[in-house]
Image (cartoon, grey):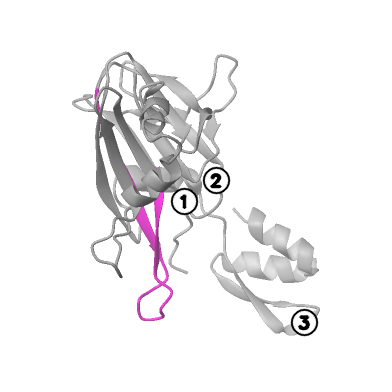
Amino acid sequence: MWNQFRALAARIGLTAEDVAAVERKGEPALVEDPRNPEVQYKVGPDPDWTQRIGEAWNQTLANSRRETAGTLLVDGGELEIANADAFGQGVTASVVAGQYEVTFTVAHLGAEETHDYEEYVSHAFVVLQGNGGVTTIEPLTDAHGVERGVVASQIAFAKPGVLQRIAGDHAGRWTLRKSDLFFPKISEAVAVDRKSVRVADDGSGTAILLRAGQGREDYPLFRLADADGTTVGVLLDFFVDNRSW
Protein backbone atom coordinates (compact mmCIF):
# COMPACT_ATOMS: atom_id res chain seq x y z
CA MET A 1 0.00 0.00 0.00
CA TRP A 2 2.94 2.36 0.53
CA ASN A 3 5.03 1.70 -2.58
CA GLN A 4 4.76 5.23 -3.96
CA PHE A 5 5.64 6.78 -0.60
CA ARG A 6 8.67 4.51 -0.19
CA ALA A 7 9.87 5.43 -3.68
CA LEU A 8 9.56 9.12 -2.78
CA ALA A 9 11.30 8.53 0.57
CA ALA A 10 14.24 6.85 -1.14
CA ARG A 11 14.51 9.67 -3.67
CA ILE A 12 14.56 12.51 -1.15
CA GLY A 13 16.59 10.66 1.50
CA LEU A 14 14.18 10.14 4.42
CA THR A 15 15.53 7.98 7.22
CA ALA A 16 14.05 4.57 8.02
CA GLU A 17 12.70 6.05 11.27
CA ASP A 18 10.90 8.83 9.37
CA VAL A 19 9.37 6.31 6.98
CA ALA A 20 8.20 4.06 9.82
CA ALA A 21 6.66 7.02 11.67
CA VAL A 22 4.58 8.04 8.64
CA GLU A 23 3.47 4.48 7.90
CA ARG A 24 2.38 3.90 11.50
CA LYS A 25 -0.15 6.70 11.11
CA GLY A 26 -1.85 4.86 8.26
CA GLU A 27 -3.25 8.12 6.94
CA PRO A 28 -2.10 11.11 4.87
CA ALA A 29 0.76 13.06 6.36
CA LEU A 30 3.17 15.89 5.57
CA VAL A 31 6.84 14.94 5.37
CA GLU A 32 9.69 17.41 5.22
CA ASP A 33 12.38 17.19 2.58
CA PRO A 34 15.57 16.59 4.61
CA ARG A 35 17.62 18.63 2.14
CA ASN A 36 15.24 21.58 2.06
CA PRO A 37 13.17 22.22 5.22
CA GLU A 38 11.01 24.72 3.33
CA VAL A 39 9.62 21.91 1.14
CA GLN A 40 6.98 19.47 2.37
CA TYR A 41 5.29 16.56 0.58
CA LYS A 42 1.77 15.36 1.22
CA VAL A 43 1.85 11.56 1.16
CA GLY A 44 -0.56 8.72 1.83
CA PRO A 45 -1.10 5.02 1.14
CA ASP A 46 -1.21 3.96 -2.49
CA PRO A 47 -4.81 3.45 -3.61
CA ASP A 48 -5.96 -0.14 -3.72
CA TRP A 49 -6.93 -0.26 -7.39
CA THR A 50 -8.82 -3.54 -7.03
CA GLN A 51 -11.02 -1.92 -4.40
CA ARG A 52 -11.47 1.18 -6.55
CA ILE A 53 -12.59 -0.91 -9.54
CA GLY A 54 -15.23 -2.51 -7.34
CA GLU A 55 -16.36 0.88 -6.05
CA ALA A 56 -16.55 2.28 -9.59
CA TRP A 57 -18.52 -0.75 -10.75
CA ASN A 58 -20.94 -0.44 -7.81
CA GLN A 59 -21.13 3.36 -8.19
CA THR A 60 -19.83 3.96 -4.65
CA LEU A 61 -16.50 5.56 -5.63
CA ALA A 62 -16.01 8.83 -3.75
CA ASN A 63 -16.03 12.10 -5.69
CA SER A 64 -17.46 10.52 -8.83
CA ARG A 65 -20.53 10.08 -11.01
CA ARG A 66 -21.58 7.66 -13.75
CA GLU A 67 -22.38 8.79 -17.30
CA THR A 68 -23.60 6.97 -20.41
CA ALA A 69 -21.72 7.29 -23.70
CA GLY A 70 -24.09 5.29 -25.92
CA THR A 71 -24.54 1.83 -27.37
CA LEU A 72 -22.69 -0.34 -29.89
CA LEU A 73 -23.87 -3.32 -31.89
CA VAL A 74 -21.20 -6.03 -31.69
CA ASP A 75 -22.90 -8.59 -33.89
CA GLY A 76 -19.73 -10.46 -34.82
CA GLY A 77 -18.61 -11.14 -31.26
CA GLU A 78 -15.44 -9.03 -31.52
CA LEU A 79 -14.94 -5.69 -29.76
CA GLU A 80 -11.97 -3.49 -30.57
CA ILE A 81 -10.52 -1.27 -27.82
CA ALA A 82 -8.12 1.03 -29.61
CA ASN A 83 -6.05 4.17 -29.56
CA ALA A 84 -8.35 6.64 -31.33
CA ASP A 85 -5.35 8.20 -33.09
CA ALA A 86 -3.34 5.09 -34.02
CA PHE A 87 -5.71 2.52 -35.43
CA GLY A 88 -3.26 -0.37 -35.41
CA GLN A 89 -2.65 0.01 -31.67
CA GLY A 90 -5.33 -1.71 -29.67
CA VAL A 91 -6.83 -4.94 -28.42
CA THR A 92 -9.60 -7.06 -29.90
CA ALA A 93 -11.64 -8.89 -27.27
CA SER A 94 -13.90 -11.86 -27.98
CA VAL A 95 -17.29 -11.20 -26.41
CA VAL A 96 -20.87 -12.41 -26.71
CA ALA A 97 -22.53 -10.93 -29.79
CA GLY A 98 -25.19 -8.34 -29.07
CA GLN A 99 -25.91 -4.74 -28.15
CA TYR A 100 -23.39 -3.19 -25.76
CA GLU A 101 -23.76 -0.12 -23.56
CA VAL A 102 -20.74 2.08 -22.91
CA THR A 103 -20.70 3.92 -19.57
CA PHE A 104 -17.93 5.64 -17.69
CA THR A 105 -17.09 7.07 -14.29
CA VAL A 106 -16.12 10.73 -14.02
CA ALA A 107 -13.96 11.33 -10.95
CA HIS A 108 -13.14 14.79 -9.69
CA LEU A 109 -10.11 16.16 -7.92
CA GLY A 110 -9.82 19.37 -5.90
CA ALA A 111 -12.65 21.73 -5.06
CA GLU A 112 -14.32 24.73 -6.62
CA GLU A 113 -13.68 26.69 -3.41
CA THR A 114 -9.93 26.30 -3.87
CA HIS A 115 -10.09 26.84 -7.65
CA ASP A 116 -8.40 23.51 -8.43
CA TYR A 117 -11.47 21.47 -9.41
CA GLU A 118 -10.78 19.05 -12.28
CA GLU A 119 -12.68 16.11 -13.77
CA TYR A 120 -11.31 12.99 -15.47
CA VAL A 121 -12.71 9.74 -16.79
CA SER A 122 -11.48 7.17 -14.26
CA HIS A 123 -13.12 3.93 -15.48
CA ALA A 124 -14.92 2.79 -18.63
CA PHE A 125 -17.37 -0.11 -18.92
CA VAL A 126 -18.58 -1.78 -22.11
CA VAL A 127 -21.25 -4.28 -21.08
CA LEU A 128 -23.76 -6.46 -22.93
CA GLN A 129 -27.30 -5.20 -22.38
CA GLY A 130 -29.46 -7.67 -20.48
CA ASN A 131 -26.37 -9.71 -19.60
CA GLY A 132 -27.97 -11.36 -16.57
CA GLY A 133 -25.36 -10.13 -14.14
CA VAL A 134 -21.59 -9.74 -14.05
CA THR A 135 -20.01 -12.01 -11.44
CA THR A 136 -16.31 -11.85 -12.34
CA ILE A 137 -13.92 -8.97 -13.03
CA GLU A 138 -10.41 -10.14 -13.89
CA PRO A 139 -7.48 -9.07 -16.10
CA LEU A 140 -8.07 -9.61 -19.81
CA THR A 141 -5.29 -11.89 -21.09
CA ASP A 142 -4.15 -13.19 -24.46
CA ALA A 143 -3.78 -16.87 -25.42
CA HIS A 144 -0.46 -17.01 -23.54
CA GLY A 145 -1.83 -15.53 -20.31
CA VAL A 146 -0.26 -12.10 -20.84
CA GLU A 147 -2.38 -9.28 -19.46
CA ARG A 148 -3.66 -6.88 -22.12
CA GLY A 149 -3.83 -3.10 -22.06
CA VAL A 150 -4.10 -0.01 -24.26
CA VAL A 151 -1.70 2.92 -24.62
CA ALA A 152 -3.70 6.01 -25.57
CA SER A 153 -5.04 9.35 -24.39
CA GLN A 154 -8.29 8.85 -26.30
CA ILE A 155 -9.87 5.39 -26.36
CA ALA A 156 -12.20 4.09 -29.08
CA PHE A 157 -14.67 1.20 -28.81
CA ALA A 158 -16.01 -0.31 -32.03
CA LYS A 159 -16.21 -3.44 -34.12
CA PRO A 160 -12.85 -4.24 -35.76
CA GLY A 161 -12.10 -1.96 -38.71
CA VAL A 162 -14.92 0.49 -38.05
CA LEU A 163 -12.76 3.27 -36.61
CA GLN A 164 -10.37 3.12 -39.57
CA ARG A 165 -13.28 3.46 -41.99
CA ILE A 166 -14.84 6.35 -40.06
CA ALA A 167 -11.52 8.20 -39.83
CA GLY A 168 -10.83 7.54 -43.50
CA ASP A 169 -14.10 9.21 -44.42
CA HIS A 170 -12.63 12.49 -43.14
CA ALA A 171 -9.80 12.60 -45.68
CA GLY A 172 -6.81 13.33 -43.42
CA ARG A 173 -8.77 15.62 -41.10
CA TRP A 174 -9.55 13.04 -38.41
CA THR A 175 -7.71 14.96 -35.66
CA LEU A 176 -9.69 18.11 -36.42
CA ARG A 177 -12.91 16.10 -36.65
CA LYS A 178 -12.29 14.61 -33.19
CA SER A 179 -11.56 18.04 -31.76
CA ASP A 180 -14.83 19.36 -33.17
CA LEU A 181 -16.68 16.41 -31.62
CA PHE A 182 -15.12 16.71 -28.17
CA PHE A 183 -15.20 20.53 -28.07
CA PRO A 184 -18.19 21.68 -30.15
CA LYS A 185 -18.66 25.44 -30.19
CA ILE A 186 -21.89 26.87 -28.86
CA SER A 187 -20.65 30.38 -29.61
CA GLU A 188 -17.51 32.01 -30.94
CA ALA A 189 -16.16 32.34 -27.40
CA VAL A 190 -17.49 29.20 -25.70
CA ALA A 191 -17.01 25.50 -26.46
CA VAL A 192 -18.55 22.49 -24.73
CA ASP A 193 -16.06 20.12 -23.05
CA ARG A 194 -17.22 16.53 -23.67
CA LYS A 195 -15.75 13.41 -22.12
CA SER A 196 -17.24 11.06 -24.74
CA VAL A 197 -18.59 11.14 -28.27
CA ARG A 198 -20.49 8.64 -30.41
CA VAL A 199 -19.60 8.62 -34.12
CA ALA A 200 -21.86 6.87 -36.60
CA ASP A 201 -21.10 7.47 -40.27
CA ASP A 202 -23.26 6.07 -43.06
CA GLY A 203 -21.98 2.69 -44.19
CA SER A 204 -19.06 2.67 -41.75
CA GLY A 205 -20.66 1.67 -38.47
CA THR A 206 -20.43 3.16 -35.00
CA ALA A 207 -17.55 4.01 -32.67
CA ILE A 208 -17.59 5.50 -29.18
CA LEU A 209 -14.62 7.61 -28.11
CA LEU A 210 -13.54 8.58 -24.58
CA ARG A 211 -10.99 11.08 -23.34
CA ALA A 212 -9.22 8.88 -20.80
CA GLY A 213 -7.42 9.46 -17.53
CA GLN A 214 -5.09 12.34 -16.68
CA GLY A 215 -1.91 11.70 -18.65
CA ARG A 216 -0.69 8.20 -17.76
CA GLU A 217 -1.76 6.76 -21.18
CA ASP A 218 -1.04 3.11 -20.31
CA TYR A 219 -4.18 1.40 -19.09
CA PRO A 220 -5.04 -2.22 -18.22
CA LEU A 221 -8.05 -4.07 -19.56
CA PHE A 222 -10.31 -6.30 -17.50
CA ARG A 223 -12.72 -9.02 -18.58
CA LEU A 224 -16.31 -8.94 -17.32
CA ALA A 225 -17.92 -12.39 -17.15
CA ASP A 226 -21.28 -13.79 -16.09
CA ALA A 227 -21.95 -16.78 -13.83
CA ASP A 228 -21.33 -19.18 -16.74
CA GLY A 229 -17.88 -17.68 -17.35
CA THR A 230 -18.99 -16.03 -20.60
CA THR A 231 -17.33 -12.73 -21.48
CA VAL A 232 -20.06 -10.09 -21.51
CA GLY A 233 -17.95 -6.94 -21.41
CA VAL A 234 -14.66 -5.18 -20.75
CA LEU A 235 -13.51 -2.62 -18.21
CA LEU A 236 -10.71 -0.07 -18.44
CA ASP A 237 -9.06 1.45 -15.38
CA PHE A 238 -7.48 4.85 -16.05
CA PHE A 239 -5.71 5.16 -12.66
CA VAL A 240 -7.25 8.48 -11.66
CA ASP A 241 -6.42 9.00 -7.99
CA ASN A 242 -9.25 11.15 -6.67
CA ARG A 243 -8.98 10.22 -2.99
CA SER A 244 -10.13 13.04 -0.74
CA TRP A 245 -6.87 13.74 1.06
Q: From the image, state whether disc 3 or disc 1 is nearer to you.
A: 1
Read off the residue under disc 1.
213
Residue 1 pos. (x, y %): 59, 53
In the displayed structure, would residue 110 be above or below residue 181?
below
Give the prevailing secondary structure in the magenta stretch. Answer: strand
Amino acid type, callout 3: Asn
Residue 147 pos. (x, y %): 56, 27
- Between discs 3 and 1, the one toward the N terminus: 3
Q: Quadrant of residue 146?
A: top right
Read off the residue under disc 2.
217
Q: Quadrant of residue 155?
A: top left
Disc 3 on helix, strand or loop? strand
Q: CA distance from mark 3 to mark 1?
A: 32 Å
Disc 1 on helix, strand or loop? loop
The segment highlighted magenta reads 99-123
Let me know if residue 102 appears in the view: no
Mark 2 Cα within 10 Å, few/some/many (few <14, many 20+)?
A: some
Measuring 21% from the left and 27% from the top, which residue is drawn there?
129
Read off the residue under disc 3.
36
Residue 48 pos. (x, y %): 51, 49
Mark 3 Cα within 10 Å, few/some/many (few <14, many 20+)?
A: few
Asked if the residues shown at circle 2 and circle 1 are in contact, with their CB atoms under 8 angstroms apart, the answer is yes
Q: Residue furthest front?
A: 171
Can you tell which mark lies on residue 32? none
- Between discs 3 and 2, the one toward the N terminus: 3
Amino acid type, callout 2: Glu
